[in-house]
Image (tube, grey):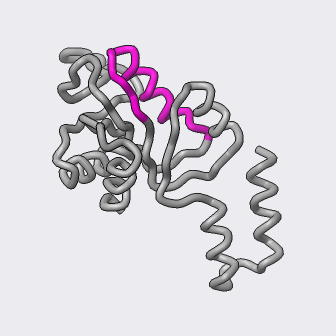
Amino acid sequence: MENGLASLVHEYWPECEMLMGTSTAGIAHAAITATILNLPMGYVRSEAKSHGRNNRIEGRMEKGAKVVVVEDLISTGGSALDVVEALREEGADVLGIVSIFTYGMKKGLDRMAAAGVVNHSLSNLDTLVEVAAEEGYIAPEWKEKIIEFRNSL
């Protein structure tokens, strides 16, 4: 999985200087992917700590650093875009987001576009549904129903 994330970063943002994981699900994936790419990494909490240095962002990030955010799952895009916003507020040049999976929900796609950020995922709901039908896990007629349901959200 992390080799796949590393490939996405390398393919779409070879100029990337640092990876930032979303807390908490993206941290391990960011750490392993950063090791593969020999890049520094950090992570962004959903809110600042209430003790110590009160950091929201962990990891040494220089202003202007070219950063890619690592997330496990994209649905509405809320948590990943919250991280993007926090990084931008601290002066990062956020190149984009890599994730393991995306539902491809319209709300998430619209929010990403409005924020001017692109997500590249290893897989998505459309592929999952297609393979599930091919392998007999779901009846073929359910493919369209599942996608229609997703599109209605």
Percent from the top left, x then y, of residue 130?
67, 72
Residue 77 painted magenta = yes
Q: Is residue 36 left or right of residue 6?
A: left
Q: Residue at x 54, y 45 (%)?
A: 74
Percent from the top left, x then y, of residue 79?
50, 34
Q: Is residue 64 above or below residue 6?
A: above
Percent from the top left, x then y, of residue 110?
67, 34
Q: Residue at x 67, y 69 (%)?
A: 129
Q: Residue at x 67, y 82 (%)?
A: 134
Q: Residue at x 66, y 80 (%)?
A: 137
Residue 46 painted magenta = no
Magenta residues span: 76-95
Percent from the top left, x then y, of residue 128?
61, 67
Say which quadrant the C terminus sits in: top right
Q: Is residue 116 left or right of residue 63?
A: right
Q: Is residue 22 above or below residue 144?
A: above
